[in-house]
Amino acid sequence: MQALPIDPFLPDILAAVRRDRALVIAAPPGAGKTTRVPPALAVDGPVIVLQPRRIAARSIARRIAAEQGWTIGREVGWHVRFERQFGVRTQVLLATEGILTARLQQGPLLSGFRTVILDEFHERSIHADLGLALGRQAWLANGELRIVVMSATLDTSRVSVFLGGCPVVDVPGRLHPIDISYHPGDALATAVAVALDASPGHVLSFLPGAPEIRRALPDVGARVGPDIEVIELHGSLDSAEQDEALRPSNRRRVILATNIAETSLTVPGVTAVVDTGLHKVARYDPERAIDSLEIERITADSAEQRAGRAARLGPGVVRRLWDARDRLRPHREPEIARVDLASTILELIAWGGDARTFEWFEAPPSEAIDAAIALLERLGAVETRRKPGATTKVTKLGEQLRRLPLHPRLARILIESNGARAAAAACALLSERHYLAPRSASTTSDLLSALDHWRDAPAHVKNVAAQIANLLEPPRTGSNLLEPIAEQEFRRWLFVGYPDRIAQRRGPNSPRVLLASGHGAVVGSESGVRDGDYLVAIDVTAGRKGEGSEARIRVASRVERDWLRPDAEELVHVFDEQLGAVRTARVERYGALVLAEHPCQPDSAIAAQMLADAYLARPLPLAAERLVRRLRFADREIDFQALVREAAAQAARLDEIDPAAALSRSVLSDLSRLAPEGLVVPSGSTVRLDYRDDGSVSAAVKLQELFGLGETPRLGPRHEPVVFELLAPNGRPVQVTRDLRSFWARTYPEVRKELRARYPKHPWPEDPWTATPTKRTVRRPQK
């Protein structure tokens, strides 16, 4: 057995685990921690090792078997989704995804194992985070259980603190040197060809995803020639195809891989790495219920781990296709901070935890927890009792969903269909993110259209579909999964699995829709769902960054209106500008979507508030402005806004609001006495008083109506004299005065002289003190 850097540390590791029951191990790629530590600890009892990926679990189990002389399925084995190879005598079990969580559900103390190992923890998969948190609870409760966290690159102090300050073992150094060079702008095929010339073994090249690998295959193959085997390695391949890429080969190879090859698995014979520096990152927007798979620059620890793949056998060569001056983020972002938490939260609630108060290693965003619980409630997986105290429990349906190795959405579809083969095929397409093309130019469901081309589906998708189909019924033989499908029934299954993704078209056959989340989206040209008022947005990707960007729906299925049951009902009041009144309807909603509106009587308080707001938002009517000035003139401190709101309570329309009508009797009495609306003049007329902003008061009146009035009237608490605008017969002012006595005595003779000739038919007496005041404009003929 080949010596590895971890070997001298194994005795200390075993002693530390026996003494402290917890340990953190940090060792670089190639140190051998994954294959050597589990068997070393298994001398004290069975070990379960959590691995992020299925392909790694199988590969590691085989490597351990080869090194230890064990047999697969007996001393060492694996348990992954849809596949298990282990028995009652298994001492080291490699497990993936939610397998460890499921074991903790069955036995919270994990008494079937002596040691739990979380490998590749630096990848911060959501399963590793949940496994660490739940494993810690079992570790605290079970004094015999031991827990070990292993990583190639990790901030070990945080994990140590989380595990009670446990010891840390650092395995230094790398087995062989690496020559790293940077080549921004180089084509991938060119970089691969140069790497083949610079090293004796296979070349491992990292690309962001399976589509990028498939596009690169022809170029790379043409460049390296027929003597070099070019193969793929990614999660979309079935188990046999993945295992084939990991088998030794005498023929030189170029392996085009995703970050699946970053993990503990060994790709034999690799002496060179070509790294594009890119990977695909799953992100979930809980506010919009939108998934996205974005190509992003890798982190520094990921780049280091990729480079380490070249130095397993001897000196390695690494060609990085980015600029050496580029600064990469140091560590990966934890999945728990960026992915859909529905499966995780369902497992945690079933375990008996409260997601909001649970002792996470690193707590997820609260809005992501809320979104996950909301989705689970829509799926019928959990129910929350609000009183006394808010408690969320898993329902019987939720228990069924949890036992299926699928996302709760897909499990719900399968259960709703009672295990129908067409539903299983649809779930396989969705779980493997493989959408068949071409789809119909026009269809009621893109997935239904895709199933018309099922024979063209990749083998691994068909295998997954067969396994899913057998989850709810006895296994069937044969590869033909599809039977005649009831189109509307199939669409309803999809609706049940994606109840939060309902969208409503903004217009007949419009591609623009409103999602139940309240956000906008566009049905992309990839989708053939062209009509129908409602649809379920099965695959939604975020729009381009920036204000006003809308999500894009790539896969949709039509929804019938009568499937939608309102989840909220409210009275909606709207101020109608044209009517000048408040219109009210009882609105039935599904999320943010309006299903129906029923006109009804408004809530009087709300209607009054809206009328008052509309009134106050406009320039005050002249009558209201005069009222405000009169109140100010009378020194009455009145909250005018409150006055308007009181008046609005008595009005049905905007033009019916009369603030004066809301004044108390005492205020009205004071206004009438201190700031009357009008003034009775000697002619018997009542002229309007104009109260001004500067605190003065004026009246415009024809001169002849004031004959005999010598004392200027005074008003208000400050006894302000009325400012008279004296008008000529044509209504134009001829004089402004606040001292009538002075006017009659000094100014009137000049005014009389000027106007008498111009208006000979009007009275212009020499003595205004004794003249009869009149409002007539024409002098009566003398008898």
Image (cartoon, grey):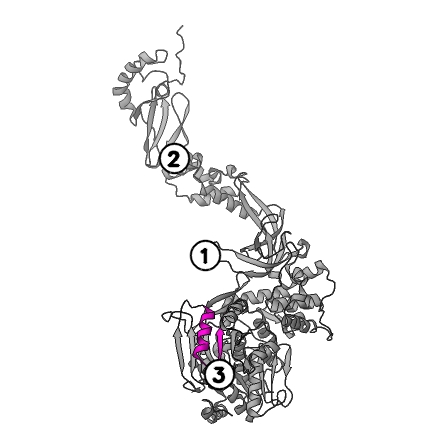
Select label 2 or label 3 by which is in front: 3
Front residue of 311 and 62: 311
Question: Residues in magenta?
Answer: 184-207
Residue at the spot 63% in from the left edge and 89% down from the top edge? 74
Earlier residue among tags 2 and 1: 1
Earlier residue among tags 2 and 3: 3
How many residues crowd around disc 3 within 10 Å: few (fewer than 14), some, or many (20 or more)? many
Image quadrant occupied by the C terminus: top left
Residue 188 part of the magenta segment:
yes
Asked if labels 3 and 1 touch by Cβ distance under 8 angstroms, the answer is no
The numbered mark at residue 674 is 2
The residue under label 1 is 546
The residue under label 3 is 150
Which element type, helix, strand or loop, lies under badge 2? helix
Q: Distance between the residues labelled 2 and 3?
A: 89 Å
Which element type, helix, strand or loop, lies under badge 1? loop
* Quadrant of residue 243 within the rendered picture: bottom right
